[in-house]
Amino acid sequence: TSLVYHYPRLSRSSVTNLLDEYTGLTSGGTASKLEGPSMRFASGISDAVNVRQATEAACQQVVEALRGAACHVVFLFVSPIYRTSWPALIGYLRDQLRPTVLIGCSGSGLIGGSQELEWVSGVSLVAAHLPEVRFYPFAVAPEELELSSPGGFWVDKIGASPDANPAFVVLAD
């Protein structure tokens, strides 16, 4: 699964400079943000055994760190132990954070803030307020890659013209 975004007011060097200034996410989601021209990033993590409690705790950390700013994108990383609860977890996040795009994956190791959780239950979120960014979430199956060719396939799949100079966040399975 991949995410494409386009921020028309910033050049690539401006985005790179902003990211270079990024000092990292702090533990517990408090003040875990990157602020640039109207942009804000936040994280939240919880190792609560109960999926609802873990989701609520991580979500609350994100809400506090975003300080009222709209949540445009959420990256969700969740322990596979919660598999049967994923639909409810995703529904809760959509209700509470109302992201334009929510993507994620499961993992036996989760990172959030200064915490690393391995082989335990947990939920980790990275959320962002990115005004004027256009999102084009898409998935590519292995068989599609075998049949793909340069040009039209990728423009249709991604939804963005190469002229837009899209940037990518890629999650590979």
Image (cartoon, helix red, strand yellow):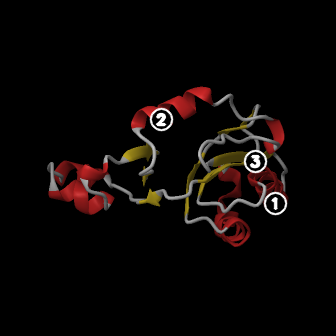
- Residue 33 position, x and y percent, is 71, 42
Q: Amino acid at mark 1?
A: Glu
- Residue 76 marker: none
In the image, taking residue 137 as reference, residue 93 lies left or right, namely right
Whether residue 147 appears in this view of the structure is yes
Residue 28 position, x and y percent, is: 83, 41
* Mark 3 residue type: Gly
Q: Which residue is mark 2?
A: 14
Is residue 172 visible in the rendered image? The answer is no
- Give the mark nearest the N terminus, 3 or 1: 3
- Tag 3 and tag 2, C-beta contact below 8 Å: no
Identify residue for label 3. 44
Disc 1, SS:
helix
- Amino acid type of the residue tagged 2 in the rendering: Ser
The CA span between labels 3 and 2 is 26 Å
Label 1 neighbourhood size at 10 Å, few (<14), some (14-19), many (20+)? many
Where does label 1 land, which residue? 56
